[in-house]
Image (cartoon, rainbow, N blue to C red):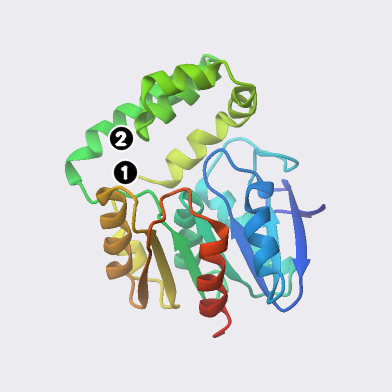
């Protein structure tokens, strides 16, 4: 694992594998760079694949106060490190981040996202505000477990499953990443599809969703694609938000190979 220094001095840990045009993979909530390892291995025969720990996660550093612009600068540092231009793929909230980076003018020939967790419902803004307030209060009080439980409940995990997870070994890793839930929350803004920002992205953008995902998630993906000047929707049959890398990799390979 190597490190690059972001603009504000924060070290960002990354790994490169494969050969070809650079392709940076960006993970979502509760993920470090290792979460994208299986997908990276499948893409490595065609691309120089970069996985990394977003700030506050894994082997990367962190610098307060957090701002979404700092995460965009992290990606800019990685792009510069691999030669000044790179394609981007973002999973879930990582997809929201790569869209932010492209809208900010990062040199990105093409990008792809998988189910960025926007909503098409305007009436959920009050719920999002309440979630932000409760999440930040839990983190400020040091109640990381409560912050994790809140997030899992908001994304639809049944209470009995959350209770089981709190007793599982994986819960400790969730708590270690709990502060980054506030980062993802800031990244998502008010939660709705940011149509004005997306309209500034002129590059081709592949917007992928799973055919077995909840309708609201699929609707958000379609709205995201429609708001982009060159949005290209693609549905993977029988897939959910927990997408199988073996199903996703061929689609990404075909799309990014056209650069």
Residue 109 can be seen in this image: no
The location of residue 16, given as percent across then percent down, is 76, 62
Q: Could you tell whether 190 is left or right of 68 in the image? A: left
**Rendering coords of residue 111 (x, y %):** 50, 70
From this view, report whether residue 194 is shown above or below residue 53.
below
- For the point 61% across and 56% down, the residue is 73
Which residue, as the protein is rendered here, is positioned at the far left? 123
Q: Name the element at disc 2.
A: helix
The number of callouts visible is 2
Q: Is residue 217 above or below residue 199?
A: above
Which quadrant of the rendered structure holds the C terminus? bottom right
Q: Residue 86, relative to residue 40: is it above or below?
A: below
Most foreground residue, 124 or 186:
124
- Identity of the residue furthest to the front in this view: 238
Q: Which mark is residue 68?
A: none
Q: Nearer the viewer, residue 63 or 26?
A: 26
Name the residue beneath numbered marker 2. 128
Q: Is residue 176 above or below residue 194?
A: above
Q: CA distance from mark 1 to mark 2?
A: 7 Å
Looking at the image, which residue sits at the far bottom? 258
Relative depth, front residue between 33 and 37? 37
Residue at 63 percent across and 72 percent down: it is: 86
Disc 1 marks which residue? 190
Q: Position of residue 247 (x, y in %)?
A: 51, 63
Q: Name the residue rendered at 66%, 55% in the picture.
A: 38
On the question of residue 186 being in view, the answer is yes
The crowd level at tag 1 (other Cα within 10 Å; few <14, some 14-19, many 20+) is some
Residue 156 coordinates in the image, percent (x, y): 35, 33
The answer to whether the residues at label 1 and label 2 have Cβ atoms under 8 Å apart is yes
Please tell me whether mark 1 sits on a helix, a strand or a loop. Answer: loop
| Residue 234 appears left or right of 97 | left
């Amino acid at each position: 694992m190597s490190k690059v220094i972001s603009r504000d001095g924060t070290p960002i840990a990354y790994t490169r594998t494969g050969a070809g045009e650079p392709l940076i993979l960006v993970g979502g909530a509760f993920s470090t760079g290792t979460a994208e390892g299986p997908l990276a291995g499948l893409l490595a025969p065609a691309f120089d694949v970069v996985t990394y720990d977003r700030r506050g996660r894994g082997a990367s550093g962190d610098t307060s106060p957090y701002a979404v612009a700092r995460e965009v600068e992290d990606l800019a540092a990685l792009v510069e490190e691999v030669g000044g231009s790179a394609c981007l793929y973002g999973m879930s909230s990582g997809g929201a981040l790569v869209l932010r980076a492209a809208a900010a003018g990062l040199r990105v020939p093409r990008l792809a996202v998988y189910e960025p967790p926007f909503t098409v419902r305007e009436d959920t803004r009050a719920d999002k505000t309440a979630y932000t307030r409760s999440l930040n209060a839990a983190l400020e009080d040091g109640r990381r477990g409560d912050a994790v439980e809140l997030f899992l409940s908001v994304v639809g995990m049944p209470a009995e499953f959350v209770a089981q997870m709190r007793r599982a070994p994986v819960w400790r890793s969730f708590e270690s990443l709990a502060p980054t839930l506030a980062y993802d929350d800031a990244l998502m803004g008010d939660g709705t599809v940011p149509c004005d920002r997306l309209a500034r992205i002129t590059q081709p953008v592949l917007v992928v969703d799973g055919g077995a995902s909840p309708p609201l998630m699929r609707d958000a993906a379609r709205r995201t694609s429609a708001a982009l000047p060159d949005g290209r929707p693609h549905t993977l049959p029988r897939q959910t938000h927990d997408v199988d890398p073996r199903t996703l990799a061929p689609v990404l390979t075909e799309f990014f190979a056209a650069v």
